C-alpha cells in the first residue's frame, strides 16, 4: 500500500488489476482460459486487459 499513497484511486485500481492479471497468468503458466476463469472474466475480456496494460508475456512475467 505504501507505494500507492500518492496516486489517484483510478491509478491504484489499475495497478491492483495489473498485478492480479499477471499473478493469475503466472499461476496458470500463460493459460488464458484458466486465468480468465479464475479472475471472473471472459477470454476476450482478459485479452483486452492484457492489451490495455501492455502485458506482453502470456505467463505474466513482462508487465
Image (cartoon, rainbow, N blue to C red):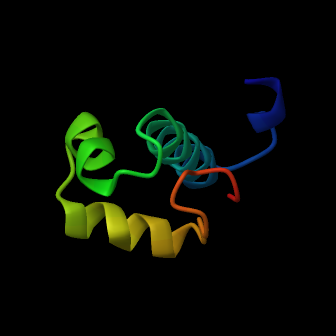
Residue 32: where, in percent of width, then height?
A: 32, 55
Task: Note whether 20 is above or below 15 in the view shown.
Answer: above
- Residue 21 locus on image (x, y percent): 47, 46
User: What residue is shown at x 47% (from left), y 43% (from top)?
Assistant: 29
Q: Is residue 21 above or below residue 54?
A: above
What is the quadrant of the N terminus in the image? top right
Residue at 20%, 42% in the rendered image: 37
Point out residue 55 in the picture as x, y percentages from the top left corner: 59, 65
Q: Which residue is drawn at 74% across and 47% down?
A: 7
Task: Tell me: 57 left or right of 6.
Answer: left
Q: Please name whichever residue, 2 or 56, is drawn nearer the observer in this view of the structure.
A: 56
Residue 34, compared with residue 44, is above or below; it is above
Classify residue 52 as left or right of residue 40.
right
Q: Decide if residue 57 is on the left or right side of residue 38.
A: right
Quarter the C terminus occupies? bottom right
Left or right relative to 4: residue 25: left
User: In terms of depth relative to the viewer, which is nearer, 4 or 15?
Assistant: 15
The structure residue drawn at horizontal position 46% and vertical position 45%, both measured from the top left corner, is 25
Q: Which of 30 and 11 is in front in this view?
A: 30
Amino acid at each position: 500500500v505504501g507505494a500507492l499513497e500518492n496516486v489517484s484511486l483510478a491509478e491504484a485500481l489499475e495497478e491492483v488489476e495489473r498485478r492480479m492479471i499477471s499473478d493469475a497468468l503466472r499461476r496458470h503458466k500463460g493459460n488464458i482460459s484458466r486465468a480468465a476463469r479464475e479472475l471472473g472474466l471472459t477470454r476476450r475480456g482478459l485479452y483486452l486487459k492484457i492489451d490495455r496494460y501492455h502485458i506482453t508475456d502470456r505467463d505474466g512475467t513482462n508487465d
